[in-house]
Image (cartoon, grey):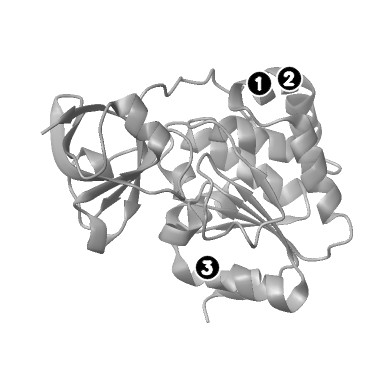
Amino acid sequence: MNNKIEKILNSDYIISFGSFLAQDNEEVKEAIIQTIAKKNAEFIYMHPIDNIDLKVYYSQLIKYEVGSEEGIASLLLETFATSPSSKIQGYLEDLDIGYISAESSAGEEEFEEAKEKSEEKTSKSLLVGRDITTHERAENIVKILAAIKKYTDLDVICLDEKTQKAVDSCEDENLEEVEELDSYNGTVVYTIFDEENCQKLVGSQSFARIAKIQNKDEVYLNFNGQKVKKEFIINEDLYGTVALCPIETDNISFLAENYRYKQVRIEKA
């Protein structure tokens, strides 16, 4: 059993942040389900896309805007920090909580509720997914996560090994101000690794309406002068306007580069 799975199994409070868990790591998902059953663990799921596979397991969903992970990380630090250094305290005092909450669509009361759920728990974990690793503000997010690890009772567990090493070794407390959020309007896709369905694009009825496409349409995803052909499939269990875009693990197209969310132009093939 690897160390990350062991930590999850020993937790009685888990926040999942920046990972569409069902597709990102089946082993981690199963470990969370197991610890919920055995230890009555509290599970908070934080992501822009609700996850039907986890709905019966999480006790709270904090749904935030695509791209706002830096702001969400700062809100987690502000919520859970105890006895931070003067440098981190200064950063927290300067945070515009109202602005970040409004921009990220994650209310202060949601974080207060998450904090309340943690109060009777003894082994708490913050599970950090690959959305953070590929974020353009990843460097500052890593510094915020390092502060969370140091000044809260949350054990920071990163699914990506490189990010874990960066968090574990980070001693830089010069946290930068949360950058203004880019808007992801229109048709946005989220890449997941799924060899079996890599020719498909899976979205909700809402996504289909915005993209002006229908179930089983052949479509092109256009991004920065590049295009990829997919078959669009409506999934009634998906909500919102972000579609899932399965790719192979060795994919070298624009879909596998940089941030996992892409604002694309969709045209029928």
Identify the residue at image location x=52%, y=68%: 28
Is 7 left, or right, of 269 in this rendering? right
Q: How many marks?
A: 3
User: Upstream in the sequence, badge 2 or badge 3?
Assistant: 3
Is 136 left, or right, of 16 in this rendering? left
Q: Which mark is residue 98?
A: 2
**x and y percent of residue 23 in the render?**
41, 59
Q: Identify the residue under disc 1.
A: 102
User: Upstream in the sequence, badge 1 or badge 3?
Assistant: 3
Kind of residue at badge 1: Ala
Residue 183 visible: yes
Q: Are marks 1 and 3 in contact (CB under 8 Å)?
A: no
Q: What element carries label 3?
A: helix
Front-lying residue, 94 or 121: 121
Is 49 left, or right, of 174 in this rendering? left
Q: Identify the residue under disc 3.
A: 28
Q: Are marks 1 and 2 in contact (CB under 8 Å)?
A: yes
Residue 123 sits above or below residue 193 on the image: below
**x and y percent of residue 267 in the render?**
17, 27
Position of the C terminus by quadrant: top left
Is 21 left, or right, of 86 in this rendering? left
- Judged from this view, the residue extending furthest toward the left is 269
Kind of residue at badge 3: Val
Kind of residue at badge 2: Gly
- Judged from this view, the residue extending furthest toward the right is 120
Residue 10 visible: no
**x and y percent of residue 225 in the render?**
14, 24
